[in-house]
Amino acid sequence: MAKYRDIADDIRQKIKNQEYTFGQKLPYEYVLCMSYHCNKETMKKALDILVKEGLIIRRRGAGTFVKDYDPAMDNPVSKFGRGLTAQYEGIKEVTSEVLEFEVVPADEHLSEKLQIDVGDFVYHIIRLRFLDKIPHLIDITYIPISVVPNLKLQHLKGSVYGYIEKVLKLKIQSCHLTINAALSTPLEQQYLGLKENEPYIQEEQISFLSNGSIFEYTLSRQHFSHFEFQTVIVQQ
Amino acid sequence: MAKYRDIADDIRQKIKNQEYTFGQKLPYEYVLCMSYHCNKETMKKALDILVKEGLIIRRRGAGTFVKDYDPAMDNPVSKFGRGLTAQYEGIKEVTSEVLEFEVVPADEHLSEKLQIDVGDFVYHIIRLRFLDKIPHLIDITYIPISVVPNLKLQHLKGSVYGYIEKVLKLKIQSCHLTINAALSTPLEQQYLGLKENEPYIQEEQISFLSNGSIFEYTLSRQHFSHFEFQTVIVQQ
DNA sequence: GAGTGGTCTAGACCACATC
DNA sequence: ATGTGGTCTAGACCACTCT
């Protein structure tokens, strides 16, 4: 683990524990460097992580301040790309009912999204996912069999991400996410409690492994009233 | 302008112009440093910008590759915090109809969102915003008068962001964004063409200036079928 | 082993804010 | 004028991938 990440983790914890509070000025860069025994550039890298998470603000000539905003908001950036199970670990119980599990050849649309050849085989999975036993999401997932050989029903009932990371030792490196809404079909009406003419909200997610290959294309649909998405945008 | 931003801009342009194409390996860090006459750390800062934008992927021991994904997708990170007018500049015509423009004292909710005292005066603005003459958004905005004195009706019809940046010389530094959905009220039904029992999608945005103060709290509501939001999430 | 990216340092110099 | 953060460099060393 890199030093600057450790420092960021430590300072983030101090902010969450309110050791550094709302609007308070952090020690000067120089003082922080001394206490963490690191170089100025290293400290900047650490603090830049917190800037991007929306926790602090740095002003040239003035100082570094804790951004007084919503302590309840957990780092929204990190909650994707780790799957539902990890996301709600210790908060809610995640269970899944597998509605569909087959292998199909990729059509043109899938070949484009997954960057594979038309006709390459992919798993096609539909899962109904429950939070604390309440149906919450319909996940439609496509995974190339070349990337994840030997996917079994038991993995779908638990955490696919867990299988990827713990058993196959692969790492999710990034996700491209598109959110939109569309009128529900009987599938969503049946499982999400939507009425005819009511829309669902969909998160389309394409996940990249750290070896550069695309691991999944998922459409995750949910009731509009359950939906919430948070992010922080920082001018670069 | 910093050198690493210039380099990032140049390489980004080359990717968009397909000089570096899908899945292609970029020149090694060392070669890039030579051709841009910069240090390795500077080049890394430049390339890290493109990594965060989802344009490239870097793999220790292997190289730097163009992420072959959706050339149509314009940098989604930069499109917020600049207002609709800037966002659609040259693409669509943005016009606004002011439905409400008054000054009110902040209640507890607003004081929390804007980090001001209860009772401090804020502008309360409701605008219907058109893209190419089609009603698209209802924006409900609150701005502390202490931050933007002298806001006038004419600014609301054009670009508030333009007034902030060009006249007051302030800079938007970051935004905290929360997206959710809720059942429409007569207001949304009247202006957005929603039916009773149909939801709108709302973007709640809190914008920070580079001097650290909060400049606006906006609820931006739109028809669910118009909504799309894209982002890239990269594991830090 | 050779190639490639990742981290860290020490020090220089610059830009901006505040007094 | 001083304090503060931002950028850049040269060089060292480490970690991972590929073959």
Image (cartoon, coloured by chain):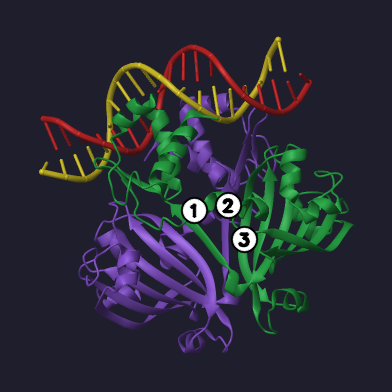
Chain colours: A purple, B green, C red, D yellow
Q: Is residue B213 visible?
A: no
Neighbourhood count class around disc 1 (C-alpha, 10 Å): few under 14, some 14–19, many 20 upward: few
Q: Gap between marks 3 and 2, in whole Å? A: 15 Å
Left or right for B216, reference A218: right
Have a look at marks 3 and 2 and say if they share a chain: yes
Q: Position of residue B103 (x, y in %)?
A: 89, 56
Q: Gap between marks 2 and 1, in whole Å? A: 8 Å
The answer to whether residue A92 is above or below residue A190 is above
Give the chain of mark 1: B
Q: Position of residue B70 (x, y in %)?
A: 40, 58
Mark 3 or mark 2, which is nearer to you? 2
Q: Gap between marks 1 and 3, in whole Å? A: 21 Å
| Marks 3 and 2 in Cβ contact (< 8 Å) | no
From the image, tell me which residue sits under label 3. Answer: B178
Q: Secondary structure at mark 1?
A: loop
Looking at the rendered structure, the kind of residue marked 1 is Asp
Q: Quadrant of residue D8?
A: top left
Q: Quadrant of the N terminus of chain A?
A: top left
Looking at the rendered structure, the kind of residue marked 3 is Thr
Give the chain of mark 3: B
From the image, tell me which residue sits under label 2. Answer: B79
Q: Quadrant of residue A145?
A: bottom left
Left or right for A205, reference A59: left
| Marks 2 and 1 in Cβ contact (< 8 Å) | yes
From the image, tell me which residue sits under label 1. Answer: B74
* Of the image marks 2 and 1, the number of the one nearer the N terminus: 1
Q: Quadrant of the C terminus of chain A?
A: top right
Looking at the rendered structure, the kind of residue marked 2 is Lys
Q: Secondary structure at mark 2?
A: helix
